[in-house]
Image (cartoon, coloured by chain):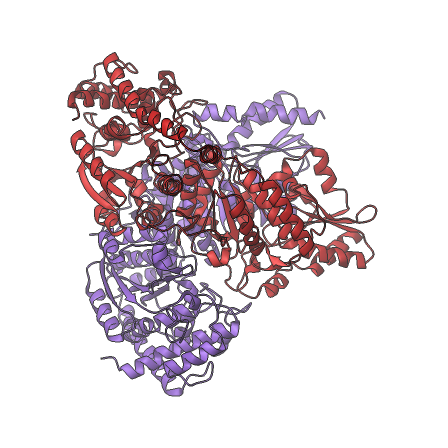
Chain colours: A purple, B red
Amino acid sequence: MIDIAEHTAMANAIRALAMDAVERAKSGHPGMPMGTADIATVLFTQFMKFDPSATNWPDRDRFVLSAGHGSMLLYSLLHLLGVEDMTIEDLKNFRQLGSKTAGHPEYGHAAGIETTTGPLGQGLATAVGMALAERIMNAEFGDDIVDHMTYVIAGDGCLMEGVSHEAIDLAGHLKLNKLVVLFDDNGITIDGSTSMSTSIDQLERFEAHGWRAERIDGLDPQAIEAALERAKASSKPSLIACRTVIGYGAPHKAGSHAAHGAPLGADEIAGAREKLGWPYPPFEIPAEIRDAWRVAGLKSGQARKEWEKRFKALDPETRATFERRIRGDLPAGVADKIEAYKAALVAEKPKVASRKASENALQMLAEAVPELLGGSADLTASNLTKAKVQKPVTPDDFDGRYIYYGIREFGMSAAMNGIALHGGFIPYGGTFLVFTDYARPAMRLAALMGVRVIYVMTHDSIGLGEDGPTHQPVEHLASLRAIPNMLVLRPGDAVETLEAWDVALNHRTGPSLLALSRQNLAAFRLEMEKANKVSLGAYEVAGCEGEADVSIFATGSEVNIALEAKALIEEAGKAARVVSVPSFELFAKQSADYRAEVIGNAKVKVGVEAAIRMGWDGIIGLDGIFVGMSTFGASGKAEDLYEHFGITPKAIAEKALEKLED
Amino acid sequence: MIDIAEHTAMANAIRALAMDAVERAKSGHPGMPMGTADIATVLFTQFMKFDPSATNWPDRDRFVLSAGHGSMLLYSLLHLLGVEDMTIEDLKNFRQLGSKTAGHPEYGHAAGIETTTGPLGQGLATAVGMALAERIMNAEFGDDIVDHMTYVIAGDGCLMEGVSHEAIDLAGHLKLNKLVVLFDDNGITIDGSTSMSTSIDQLERFEAHGWRAERIDGLDPQAIEAALERAKASSKPSLIACRTVIGYGAPHKAGSHAAHGAPLGADEIAGAREKLGWPYPPFEIPAEIRDAWRVAGLKSGQARKEWEKRFKALDPETRATFERRIRGDLPAGVADKIEAYKAALVAEKPKVASRKASENALQMLAEAVPELLGGSADLTASNLTKAKVQKPVTPDDFDGRYIYYGIREFGMSAAMNGIALHGGFIPYGGTFLVFTDYARPAMRLAALMGVRVIYVMTHDSIGLGEDGPTHQPVEHLASLRAIPNMLVLRPGDAVETLEAWDVALNHRTGPSLLALSRQNLAAFRLEMEKANKVSLGAYEVAGCEGEADVSIFATGSEVNIALEAKALIEEAGKAARVVSVPSFELFAKQSADYRAEVIGNAKVKVGVEAAIRMGWDGIIGLDGIFVGMSTFGASGKAEDLYEHFGITPKAIAEKALEKLED
């Protein structure tokens, strides 16, 4: 039984901290935490399995504040529960440069922030990934070791965003019943009443997606408690629509969009203090209320001690595997297997599309790295993302390693973030490169958070052919390279594709993207070299005697074209070399000496990529020749398109030779 | 009453053309047209108001093939109905370079293609914009002149994509009852059965969004006819889930994903011919079937003649206005009003954020250009997109000029495409610049189609302050400039903002994007110049005596910083000039002489933009100094952030002076 007086005081502590921190920062969103304080208080005092002294305990319940602008709710909770990393000083520094308490929750800024939120809808979609990872881990390690809930607080904005559809459709299909969404149903958006832009019946909507859904009074702690009990017992994911009042307690602004995104002001705050019965000065929490929160924190952490006992009772091998997986280390021996496979490729010299080379590599990697969790946004047979050994994950059997994500590029990418954040897996997922546009908001968050997810993006140029310009990426390589901390890899043959996978698996501080061809590519890495050359970003694949007249720099499917151009240039009596540039980001990280050596001093430098020039000047110089695209593509056979857009050995050779004569 | 035998033969003509064209192209998607041929036949023979001889007639019903991979359905229809622009040769050239019959329908390639589709979900979302434009035009011009339906054929993929949620939620809210979605409910996606990735109840889902929904047998023409009758009579938008069989008629591949995206093969096609009772050779349509289609085309065009009569009976002024609006010409006198307003700004020299300058300009423009149709994705008071004169569009009153799009950036942008394609309006819509990531797929389609839509993207840098890195664009200017045919404008004061609006309004061959600041900016355009300087892309705003030692190039909010840096450099005894670069794309279009003159020969060139360097080398050179961002932003006060990231007059001056001494 909830002690209402105590509950109310505890919830009001959140409200006060939120309004006071926003006031002090002179910026922020007080309305959301004030409206949802009761929900959060019941959740964290009665339900959450969360140890404030061990916020990374693997089997903790996850809490995702999808309505990330209400960040003071999360910061207040962490502080009140006794997370050491969140002091009252941190709250006072809300939204100040260098503080842990950024305007929106930033993953990594403080213990207990499970994910970065703010871009609406994504918290929910990320939580679906967490809940999915939990079920798959559970299928492997059992209820004793992995068995936790994922709770989300989402606002109207989260549920209006399209990604919410993708997320709840996937969650409903997979029956992720340990996922509970608490909908802050306050009827208010920034523009005013939600009735200005939506007439949806959210309960009916969620039910149509296979969820359990109910509506409660979100200011009534007992109603919240009862609803959460029902949700935990459900065989489906649950939506609890909580009728709340934005800015609850503020005498004039409560219930209005005026409480959403600006400080309430001194008068309104004074009025709220009176109305809430909270006479204490800003940032002061009476000892008894603080104690009540600390007790709740201690209680919610109890489960960890029992878990630790169970975990210690496991056989050492399972324990070691679990710990390794949670740490994110690769299994021992992977490097050797990759090396052996590379030797086989060098011997075989397959002429295959890099998407096919990726599939072949995955057949080996999926066995060597069992934490690889694959998937595709309904393009499995095109992206070639499924290894034979990978069993599909289904609503009835989570003991698999492959997700049929459906036609949901954004939902897939956000779920991959959640899977990576949850721990235990290295998620990868595929679609066509052009549809990174659909997934981009989640890819940006992956880069911002620095999580290891791998995008397998095939059909990476006009080389995909007849599907035409809607399906042909042109600006995508540049615009993905533009995202800070996004590692873009465009391998040119089977060996480079394997090396790219190797780089991606070992790249733990951010997402990697493999841009792969539909068309076949001849092997050019013909000799065994143990070193991973893709990791250098760029390297010479074909040199020449003496000084080169022409240096040709190419990526992916254009390396072969560059090699043919080299032959034509040599036929004309000039010396040419070819540099493969599988990754601009990795090349930029090399020493100035190495970079200078690879770029070289040829009179003519040519960049070749079936994409726009943006970003190439740093390699070929402003006077370099660029052979690529400057417009959208077209529908036609791949060969015809390369010819039409002038991306051919002949065009390269002619331009280079002409310039040599200048 | 539908003549079943005739109907079946007409539908089979579509099936045959689709499978034969795909076979000939050796690539394409036969399954969708074969499955939906009955739906399309009933729609075009019994319902569509569509004149094959006047495909641009303004009051025609719109048909959007959201499942764009089924392009042969549309091409076949246009050919059979007698659209001159679509010959049998065009069908034979399906998917070949230079043909009208691209892999996916491309707007502008042939008469009768209402929009480019292929990226899933967007056809539906674009159609919402068309249906919305229709209602707003109807409110203005009445039932006699604008009163048409918008029909969509959408597949499972369209309805899985998140944008479908945004689109149907908006349409349901606005009660767009002249919108009918025919759902090709074939239970198949590329990966296999839809049951592998979704368990949704689409009828319940659409009903929750305020739609009328029913399920029918999509192979039964009478059921289709009856359902379309009910849909036309509905007061809500309608979903008709049509149970179909993908690849209907193919003896072995029908009902399987094998029929989706590859030629059926000779044997299967021979079997289909037999099963369908279609003994004719490829691309041969018997005269009687061809005649039946031509008669249907003539019949469906009848309504146009009656409309022409009604239109001619209008008063000349209304007629002229309607014709002008459909042509897309601006009203007479707009240029004068812009000039007068510019003179006022030059006199006033307001220090305002460019978002505010945009709002001020809009107060004038919304009156001068009544076809401006504004909106925001729930950030009206932040984007400052609403002019006072603009009445909101509501479900009960379409006689407005402002749409509360809700928290639906992608849905808004796709709807804007539909509004522009419909004709009669110049749509603009706002959100934060960082959330172009959410809208990007629709923005790319706008650029590909070359339609005039205007994005009002505010909060365009770290200058937005405390909301932090999730809300701060860093890579967005570069990645938007990367999109072919996207015009990016970043004005630096009120005059430039007005000029940017002027450019955007007159830019008829593609989308324009205004990147606008949250923070206040001092005026630097202090003298009246009639010429639109923003249209030059870059121009000198502050020169110096003699040769400049330093040229500083800056955009938007950084022009003021550059001007302060100039003063500091001059205090140190060196000559500096400042060039404002509001648009890279427009600058690239200027003559080589003009470009060279503006870039100049200063020893030191500095680029200043609170964003990444990508794209700047062409202006400042590889050895130019770039003062901007190379990482994500941070949460803090705008001033603190500019200081922290070193984007200050002092930092610019120091770096420039240091380099001068090299």
Q: Looking at the image, can residue A507 be seen?
A: no
Q: Is residue B293 above or below residue B383?
A: above
Q: Residue at x 64, y 39 (%)?
A: B587
Horizontal and vertical percent position of residue B528? 71, 47
Q: Is residue A631 above or below residue B161?
A: above
Count of labels shown? 0
Q: Nearer the viewer, residue B177 or B621?
A: B177
Quarter of the figure with the C terminus of chain A: top right
Name which quarter of the figure residue B55 lies in: top left
**A380 sits to left or right of A596:** left
Which of A47 and B575 lies nearest the eye of the viewer?
B575
Which quarter of the rendered picture does the N terminus of chain A lie within? Answer: bottom left
Taking depth in this image into account, of A131 and B4 the one nearest to the observer is: B4
| Residue A550 horizontal/vertical position (percent) | 65, 30
Q: Quadrant of residue B627?
A: bottom right
Residue found at the far bottom of this picture: A287
In-image side of B550 versus B463 (left or right)? right
For residue A198, side relative to residue A491 (left or right) = left
Can residue A173 be spotted in the picture?
yes
Q: Is residue B341 left or right of residue A60?
A: right
Residue A339, image x, y percentages: 44, 44
Q: Determine the residue positioned at 68% across, 37% down.
A: A601
